[in-house]
Image (cartoon, rainbow, N blue to C red):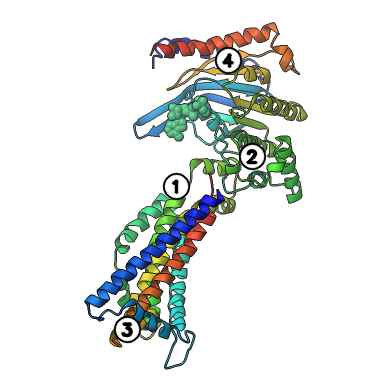
């Protein structure tokens, strides 16, 4: 990997970013990633996936993470969720240092992670049943039903995951994360396997859910889709290539809400943001192309 | 689709019949070469019908073949059942904890290759009773395949499934019943299938050693000591068919509880 030029630039941009986020001290952060490094022990030695990542996300903010495949987006999501412990630094979620997963953080895994022996309905019910302690079983069933209807899978509730298409599995995973009604939603390429139409309606559902809760839910989403990132997010985090990936740049998306998908594409600031993101990503492509 | 399926079915039945005919021919040949020392299929058939008369007769001086078969099956069921009931939880512990694995695995590796028959005298010494000694022998040899396969299954639960349990805060009970057992069940059933096969093989030997009961005794006493090779052959055929049926039951269960990912 030729990261010889990149790191010096990264260091600068990261420092600028850290200063910037320190300013609004009075705002309660929902997620604080403080100087996080994640290394894995592998047979070939220690592999550092992400390094010195600092990122503070406000309550109710929607943040997208984009970056090359293998740069460590999922790894970062796992540290927020508490599945993977950082080798250095710390993650704080809702004011508490993350040591393990909790029902305050709902996850849509990149590979869906459905249990193959449980029906669609059971997959969601067991998660709801485990995560929510203070509801009756009738209330839990209602939650499952509502969320399955939201992702339009109620008719398929008795199927096993093996009988579903990729997009359907993804929607089950989304329904499962939504059903436990977490304050933080961690979505790892949640709409990647969906067709454009279904994707659009899932965007609407996601924003509906967010609005319903008075925009108090914090959403962190990994995506490869620039348009999706801009349409949904308040900020887009662009990551460098790994190993030891850092944050390359954070792009603000100050477009007013509610956003109209058809209209914002003609908005000048939308186009500027789109351009900036594309440049950041293409920049990387060209570095890779030399090899 | 259905038509092809039927043709294939018919073909496999045809092959099966062909195989039987071939075996019958070889048998016939050996029989004539040994001047009927080994009885011909026809003579054996006569003895077979004789043996099959009143299979459930259960008098003190005469026990039908069905009664003998059931008594063998019963001993297998007890030994295999208790062995499995112990092997499955221990296998789960071994699979979920490296420490338990490291403690138990060396013992398993040493004891597993021991011939089941070697356990018979030990069982006899412990229980002072030969039927119980043969149950003990079945018990011991039923342990290993189930233990090893269960441990393998539990230790290979995919990280994805564990992540679901972690992310949604599954209780231990939910984790065991909704993830460990469903994932491990096909492995457990493989272990049970191997175990029942061994158990069925071993019971005949055990009954020969202990005497007085079951199919093993029939082979030894009425067949060998009674000078009727036909009876030995009849017993072999019955043992083989029952073994096949036992295997098929577990094969069916394996299929039923395997899941498409
Ligand atoms: N458990 C692990 N053990 C060892 N290495 C790991 C582990 N998990 C991730 N990695 C490595 O860390 C790096 C980042 O992986 P990660 O899954 O976070 O990438 P990603 O950005 O999500 O990629 P994609 O866009 O393809 O999903 C990869 O090089 C991967 O091989
Ligand atoms: Mg990923």
For label 1, the residue is B156
For label 3, the residue is B223
Q: How crowded is mark 3: few (under 14 residues within 10 Å), some or many (20 or more)?
A: some
The reply to whether callout 3 and callout 1 are in contact (CB within 8 Å) is no
Q: Which mark is residue A264?
A: none
Query: Is disc 3 in the same subunit as disc 1?
Result: yes
Q: Residues within 10 Å of mark 1 (few under 14, many from 20)?
A: some
Q: Which of marks 3 and 2 is in front?
A: 3
> x, y percentage for residue B236?
36, 75
Query: Is disc 4 in the same subunit as disc 3?
Result: no
- Badge 1 marks a residue whose secondary structure is loop
Q: Which of marks 3 and 1 is nearer the N terminus?
A: 1
Q: Quadrant of residue A218?
A: top right
Q: Earlier in the sequence, mark 2 or mark 4?
A: 2
For label 2, the residue is A103
For label 4, the residue is A250
Q: Residues within 10 Å of mark 2 (few under 14, many from 20)?
A: many
> x, y percentage for residue B73?
45, 75
The reply to whether callout 1 and callout 4 are in contact (CB within 8 Å) is no
Gap between marks 2 and 1 measured at Cα: 26 Å
Gap between marks 2 and 4 measured at Cα: 28 Å
Say if B148 sits above or below B28 in the image: above
Say if B154 sits above or below A242 in the image: below
Instruction: Chain letter for mark 1, please.
Output: B
């Amino acid at each position: 990997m030729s990261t010889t030029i990149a790191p010096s630039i990264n260091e600068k941009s990261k420092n600028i970013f850290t200063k910037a986020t320190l300013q609004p001290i009075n705002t309660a952060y929902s997620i604080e990633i403080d100087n996080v490094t994640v290394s894995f022990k592998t047979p070939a030695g220690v592999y550092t996936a992400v390094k010195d990542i600092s990122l503070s996300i406000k309550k109710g903010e929607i943040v997208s993470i984009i970056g090359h495949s293998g740069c460590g987006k999922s790894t970062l999501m796992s540290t927020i969720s508490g599945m993977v412990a950082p080798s250095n630094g710390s993650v704080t979620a809702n004011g508490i240092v993350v040591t393990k997963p909790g029902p305050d953080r709902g996850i849509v895994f990149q590979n869906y992670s459905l249990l193959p022996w449980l029906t669609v309905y059971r997959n969601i019910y067991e998660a709801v049943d485990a995560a929510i302690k203070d509801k009756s079983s009738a209330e839990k069933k209602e939650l499952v039903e509502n969320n399955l209807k939201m992702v339009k899978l109620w008719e398929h509730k008795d199927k096993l995951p093996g009988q579903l298409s990729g997009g359907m599995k993804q929607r089950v995973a989304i329904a499962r994360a939504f059903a436990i009604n977490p304050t933080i939603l961690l979505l790892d390429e949640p709409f990647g396997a969906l067709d454009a139409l279904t994707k659009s309606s899932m965007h609407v559902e996601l924003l509906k859910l967010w609005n319903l809760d008075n925009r108090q839910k914090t959403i962190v989403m990994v995506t490869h889709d620039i348009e999706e990132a801009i349409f949904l997010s308040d900020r887009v985090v662009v990551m460098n290539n790994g190993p030891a990936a850092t944050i390359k740049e954070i792009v603000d998306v100050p477009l007013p809400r509610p956003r109209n998908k058809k209209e914002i594409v003609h908005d000048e600031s939308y186009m500027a943001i789109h351009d900036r993101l594309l440049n950041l990503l293409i920049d990387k492509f060209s570095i890779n192309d030399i090899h | 689709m259905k038509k092809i399926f039927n043709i294939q079915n018919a073909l496999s039945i045809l092959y099966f019949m062909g195989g039987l005919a071939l075996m019958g021919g070889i048998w016939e040949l050996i029989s004539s070469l040994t001047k009927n020392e080994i009885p011909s299929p026809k003579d054996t058939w006569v003895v077979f019908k004789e043996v099959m008369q009143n299979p459930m007769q259960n008098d003190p001086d005469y026990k039908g073949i069905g009664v003998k078969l059931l008594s063998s099956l019963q001993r297998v069921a007890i030994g295999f059942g208790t062995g499995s009931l112990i092997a499955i939880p221990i296998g789960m512990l071994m699979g979920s904890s490296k420490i338990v694995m490291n403690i138990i695995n060396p013992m398993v590796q040493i004891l597993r290759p021991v011939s089941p028959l070697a356990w018979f005298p030990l069982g006899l010494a412990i229980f002072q009773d030969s039927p119980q000694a043969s149950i003990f022998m079945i018990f011991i040899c039923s342990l290993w395949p189930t233990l090893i396969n269960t441990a393998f299954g539990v230790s290979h639960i995919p990280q994805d499934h564990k992540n679901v349990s972690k992310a949604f805060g599954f209780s231990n009970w939910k984790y065991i019943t909704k993830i460990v057992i469903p994932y491990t069940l096909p492995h457990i059933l493989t272990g049970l299938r191997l175990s029942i096969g061994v158990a069925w093989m071993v019971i005949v030997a055990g009954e020969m050693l202990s005497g007085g009961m079951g199919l093993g005794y029939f082979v030894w006493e009425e067949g060998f000591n009674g000078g009727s090779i036909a009876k030995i052959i009849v017993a072999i055929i019955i043992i083989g068919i029952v073994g096949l049926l036992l295997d098929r039951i577990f094969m069916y269960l394996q299929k039923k509880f395997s899941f498409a990912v």
